[in-house]
Amino acid sequence: MHNDIPERTRIVTGTEPRRLNHRHVSLARRILDVAAERGMSPGERLAEQALASLCNVSRTPVRKALQILAEQGLATPDSEGGYVLATDPVAGGRLDAGIATDRESEIHDAVLRDLAAGRIAETQTVASLQRRYDVPRQTVQNVLLELAEENLAERAPGQQWLLKQFAVGPDATARSYEFRLAMEPLALSLPDFRRDFTAMAALRQSMLLLRAMPEAGFDRGLFDRIDLDFHLLVARGCGNPFIAEALAGHHRRRRKVAGSSHVGTFRLMQSNQEHLQILEHIERGQMELAADLMSVHLRLSSAQRPRLAGRGVPSLFRAVS
């Protein structure tokens, strides 16, 4: 009997359901993001070692994550061992949101809520969190490792961990835009910017897919993925490893904490159009213009204007299209 296990927390293999590890599910989603970012197509091999390096983990959790993708029909076993991609990671590669997971997911979200509300201090130990949430030590350790991978926590001296309250507090969004306004236009204007035409072509295809969607059927989950991929492309292309590292870490954390839930659908549709126009100028090598448009895009997003006059793209974007 498995009636006491919610359907959303288990995957059925044969007749036996099993609960999933929160970190493995998150890593499976990250692998799909990597596949989309690198423009991978169905049938391409998902190499464990390469994914482990890209995701900054060991091969063991990558293997577990690939098993989850296979169970969801997003990867298939390869005749030579390992797995290959089974679907387009941009248009169809979405992990079922309903499979998430065990107690770790609940504690992960509870820590972030309590941190944002000031109910817990930034400096914590495994033991202190274990007492607060009344869970096993291993659960807390796994949650802290997950937060560290998301750039929301880091190890401190001794047995302590530092939780990054500034990233989830009430001023986090405004401070995030200040940082991005200073760094992203600069990244685009650096002389060593490298254009990844394969990744840009995959992004263009995804953006056009979003642009064709009506407002009522707009896919916010797909937008969030494409938004991350677009801004990561800018970060990694800039040619300065310090700026690239800072921006890439910030965008992963931003996606985990904020997403698009607080933004009106029409503004997201505008953002996608702005992304597309910036991408076009990057492809043409018009980097100063791309940097200027990035500044406009970030200021509009910071203002969170779901509707602008005329329900069209801003005049500056129309002028250069």
Image (cartoon, rainbow, N blue to C red):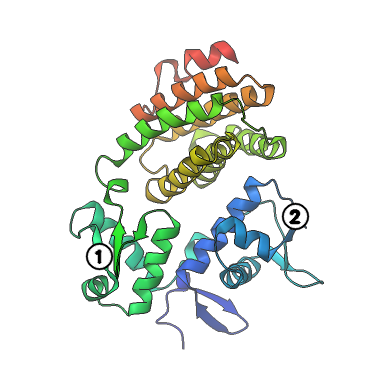
Q: Nearer the viewer, residue 105 or 47?
A: 47
In the depicted structure, whether residue 318 falls above or below residue 244: above
In the depicted structure, whether residue 185 falls above or below residue 135: above
Visible in this render: residue 279? yes
Q: Residue at x 71, y 62 (%)?
A: 47
Q: Nearer the viewer, residue 134 or 59?
A: 59
Q: Quadrant of residue 64?
A: bottom right
Q: Which residue is mark 2?
A: 42
Q: Mark 2 falls on what kind of element?
A: loop
Whole-angstrom CA distance, mark 1 to mark 2, is 44 Å
Q: Residue at x 40, y 25 (%)?
A: 300
Q: Residue at x 72, y 39 (%)?
A: 198
Left or right of 122 on screen, residue 301: right
Label 2 packing within 10 angstroms: few (<14), some (14-19), many (20+)? some
How far from the left and from the top, in percent, is residue 173?
Answer: 32, 38
Q: Mark 1 falls on what kind of element?
A: strand
Q: Which residue is mark 1?
A: 124
Q: Amino acid at mark 1?
A: Gln
